[in-house]
Structure formats: structure tokens, C-alpha cells
Image (tube, rainbow, N blue to C red):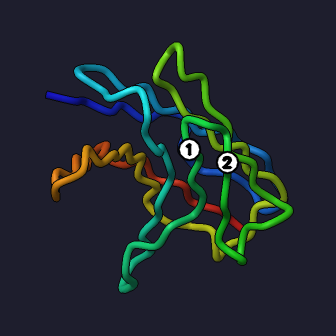
């Protein structure tokens, strides 16, 4: 089984620059995508940023230029550096890792989430 543990959330002032961390453990296929999603109250969960094991990253338009995702594949860890936070960034942030082995075999795991609250 795979477990993901997030850290780094909390109450932050607008304009702040917290860093989220996520460490994955268990049987993780080396070719995978790790990412961060968020869910604000009353809204659907949305992708914030993701990065492949090859280092390719993509971002939601709302965070481009402000957030940076990175990973340490040797540690099965992924990070999200958040800069210039805005109140609308307030949400529960979830770490995710997933991979496909073909023939419909998709493996998808989530962390428990960490709350990020941005005060104006």
C-alpha cells in the first residue's frame, strides 16, 4: 500500500510564501506523476500543479508564476513552493501520486490533505 503524508500548511498572511511537502512511502512505481490538488469550501477539487518523474511540470492558470512544484524522486517526495499567496488560495491541499501500467491498470493515491488559510 502507498501512503502520502503532507506537511507545511497553516494560517498565512496574504503575500506569504509557505512551502508544502509530501512524502510518499510504499510500493511506488518509478515512473509516476506527483502533484498537488486543492479543494476550497463549496468547490470541486482542482489540480494545482503536477510533475512527472521525468521532470515535466504543469500548473493551473491561477497559480502560474506564483507556485513552483518540485520533486525528489529518490525520496519519493514532492514540494509546492507557494509565493504571493492570495485569499482565494485558501483551500485544503492534497498530495497525489499516480501511474499507469497499461491494460487499464491505474494506481492513484491521495494524502489526507493539509489546510492552507490565507488571511487578508
Task: Determine whether 61 is above or below 36 in the image.
Answer: below
- The residue most toward the front is 103
* In the displayed structure image, the side of residue 118 where residue 24 appears, left or right: left
Q: Position of residue 97 (x, y in %)?
A: 37, 43
Q: Residue 1 carries which label?
A: none
Residue at the image point whose x is 67% and y is 37% from the top: 70
Q: Position of residue 89 (x, y in %)?
A: 63, 68
In the rendered image, is residue 109 in sight? no
The foreground one among 83 and 70 is 70
Whether the residues at callouts 1 and 2 have beta carbons within 8 Å, the answer is yes
Specify the quadrant of the image occupied by residue 86. Answer: bottom right
Task: Determine whether 30 is above or below 38 in the image.
Answer: above
Residue at the image point whose x is 50% and y is 15% from the top: 75
Q: Mark 2 points at which residue?
A: 56
Task: Determine whether 118 is above or below 7 in the image.
Answer: below
Label 1: state its secondary structure: strand
In the rendered image, is residue 112 in sight? yes
Specify the quadrant of the image occupied by residue 39. Answer: bottom left
Q: In which quarter of the image is the C terminus?
A: bottom right
Task: Determine whether 8 is above or below 107 in the image.
Answer: above
Q: Position of residue 117 (x, y in %)?
A: 56, 59
Residue at the image point whose x is 13% and y is 28% from the top: 1
* In the displayed structure image, the side of residue 15 where residue 2 appears, left or right: left
Q: Residue 52 carries which label?
A: 1
Count of numbered labels shown in the rendering: 2
Q: How crowded is mark 2: few (under 14 residues within 10 Å), some or many (20 or more)?
A: few
Label 2: state its secondary structure: loop
Amino acid at each position: 500500500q502507498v501512503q502520502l503524508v503532507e506537511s507545511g500548511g497553516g494560517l498565512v498572511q496574504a503575500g506569504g510564501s509557505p512551502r508544502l511537502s509530501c512524502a510518499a512511502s510504499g510500493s511506488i512505481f518509478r515512473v509516476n506523476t506527483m502533484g498537488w490538488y486543492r479543494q476550497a469550501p463549496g468547490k470541486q477539487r482542482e489540480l494545482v500543479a503536477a510533475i512527472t518523474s521525468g521532470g515535466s511540470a504543469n500548473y493551473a492558470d491561477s497559480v502560474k508564476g506564483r507556485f513552483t512544484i518540485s520533486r525528489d524522486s529518490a525520496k519519493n517526495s514532492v514540494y509546492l513552493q507557494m509565493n504571493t499567496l492570495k485569499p482565494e488560495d485558501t483551500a485544503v491541499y492534497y498530495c497525489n501520486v499516480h501511474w499507469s501500467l497499461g491494460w487499464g491498470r491505474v494506481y492513484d493515491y491521495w494524502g489526507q490533505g493539509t489546510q492552507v488559510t490565507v488571511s487578508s
